[in-house]
Amino acid sequence: MTRRAAGVEKGTFYDLRRAFQTVGAETLEYRAVSFIMGHTVSEKDMSGRYTVEIPDERIKKVCDHVRKWYRGGK
């Protein structure tokens, strides 16, 4: 359903997640990509534990980049 709503003809939900992760990482905003993906921080990841918040600008940067890629503007 998510795939069809996004206008993607074939593939799975996890294909969409892999594409988002891969393209989003091009921004070098790894924490923002992980946050958007819903990934949780490991107890052993001290830098993740000390990150209090991710500014909206970083999240927007990732989303804008993926949106531009998806629409063929890369």
Image: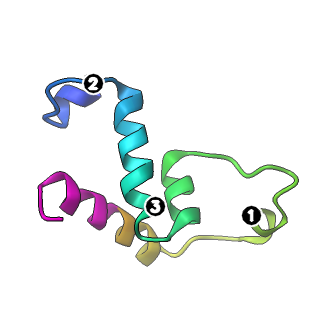
User: As shown in the figure, which amino acid type bears the numbered disc 3?
Assistant: Ala
Report the magenta residues as a range.
63-74
Disc 2 target residue: 11
Assign a secondary structure to mark 1: helix
Pointer 3 with pointer 1, Cβ within 8 A: no
- Return the disc, 2 or 1, that comes first in the chain's sequence: 2
Disc 3 target residue: 25
* Image position, residue 44 (x, y; %): 87, 54
> In which quadrant of the rendered view does residue 11 lie?
top left
The mark found on residue 48 in the picture is 1
* Image point (20%, 23%), residue name: 10
Q: Is 64 contained in the magenta span?
A: yes
User: As shown in the figure, which amino acid type bears the numbered disc 2?
Assistant: Gly
- Where 49 sits versus 36, above or below? below
Residue density around tag 3, few if under 14, some if 14–19, many if 20 or more, within 10 Å? some
* Image point (52%, 76%), residue name: 55
* Image position, residue 1 (x, y; %): 25, 22
Assign a secondary structure to mark 2: loop
Give the CA separation, mark 2 to mark 3: 21 Å
Q: How many marks?
A: 3
- From the image, give the main secondary structure of the stretch colored magenta: helix
Give the CA separation, mark 2 to mark 1: 32 Å
Residue density around tag 1, few if under 14, some if 14–19, many if 20 or more, within 10 Å? some
- Where 10 sits versus 70, above or below? above
